[in-house]
């Protein structure tokens, strides 16, 4: 089963997304801070990370750098509510696989989940 770590401090949105992702056949782990996310990343070794750009203790871009030091080929999708601060182009330049804008539309989430399944050779 593909394991996804969601690091987002917006608890209700994160937990709602996690529930949907889980129902789509993924194993989901959640964290509210960069520190918690980094700890879980080391312990649980996820395949994919959904990473909020604006976390209370460290910005997502810097956390992404730490994650890449641990697992060079980690698949990361950035999540942000502010395209003025962080754009899809910023995500691409940072080495992210993709980008989701908050509030996350279900069709966009399902498209990303299908992409992930394709990356891992899981039948969509």
Image (cartoon, helix red, strand yellow):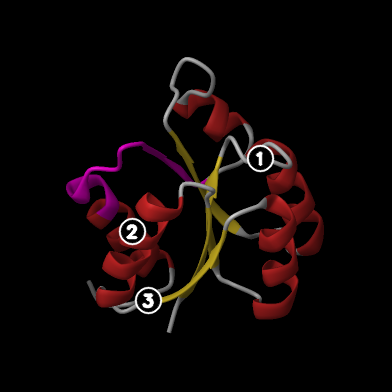
Which sits in the foreground, 27 or 1?
Answer: 27
Q: Residue at x 34, y 66 (%)?
A: 118
Question: How far is disc 1 from disc 3 in space, using C-alphas?
Answer: 26 Å
What element does badge 1 sit on? loop
What element does badge 3 sit on? loop
19 with respect to 68 (left or right) = left
Alpha-carbon neighbours of circle 3 within 10 Å: few (<14), some, or many (≥20)?
some
Q: Residue at x 54, y 33 (%)?
A: 91
Q: Residue lying at the far top in this picture: please name it.
A: 84
- Residue 42 % position (x, y): 75, 72
Foreground mark, 2 or 1, reads 1
- Residue 28 % position (x, y): 45, 73
Foreground mark, 3 or 2, reads 2
Alpha-carbon neighbours of circle 1 within 10 Å: few (<14), some, or many (≥20)?
few
Q: Which residue is mark 3?
A: 26
Q: Is residue 25 above or below residue 105?
A: below
Q: Which residue is mark 1?
A: 56
User: How many marks on residues?
Assistant: 3
Q: Is residue 43 above or below residue 96?
A: below
Q: Residue at x 45, y 54 (%)?
A: 11
Indicate yes or no whether the magenta region holds residue 30: no
Q: Which residue is mark 2?
A: 17
6 with respect to 13 (left or right) = right
What element does badge 2 sit on? helix
Indicate yes or no whether the magenta region holds residue 102: yes
47 with respect to 114 (left or right) = right
Q: Is residue 38 above or below residue 103?
A: below
Pick whichever of labels 1 and 3 is earlier in the sequence: 3
Q: Report the span colored magenta.
A: 97-109
Pick whichever of labels 2 and 1 is earlier in the sequence: 2
């Amino acid at each position: 089963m593909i394991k996804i770590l969601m690091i987002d401090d917006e608890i209700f949105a994160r937990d709602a997304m996690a529930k949907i992702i889980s129902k789509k056949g993924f194993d989901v782990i959640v964290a509210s801070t960069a520190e918690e996310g980094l700890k879980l990343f080391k312990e649980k070794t996820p395949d994919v990370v959904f990473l909020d750009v604006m976390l209370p203790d460290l910005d997502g871009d810097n956390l992404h750098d730490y994650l890449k030091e641990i697992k060079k080929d980690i698949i990361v999708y950035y999540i942000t509510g502010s395209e003025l601060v962080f754009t899809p182009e910023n995500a691409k330049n940072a080495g992210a696989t993709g980008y989701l804008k908050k509030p996350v539309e279900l069709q966009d989430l399902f498209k990303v989940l299908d992409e992930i399944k394709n990356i891992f050779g899981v039948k969509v």
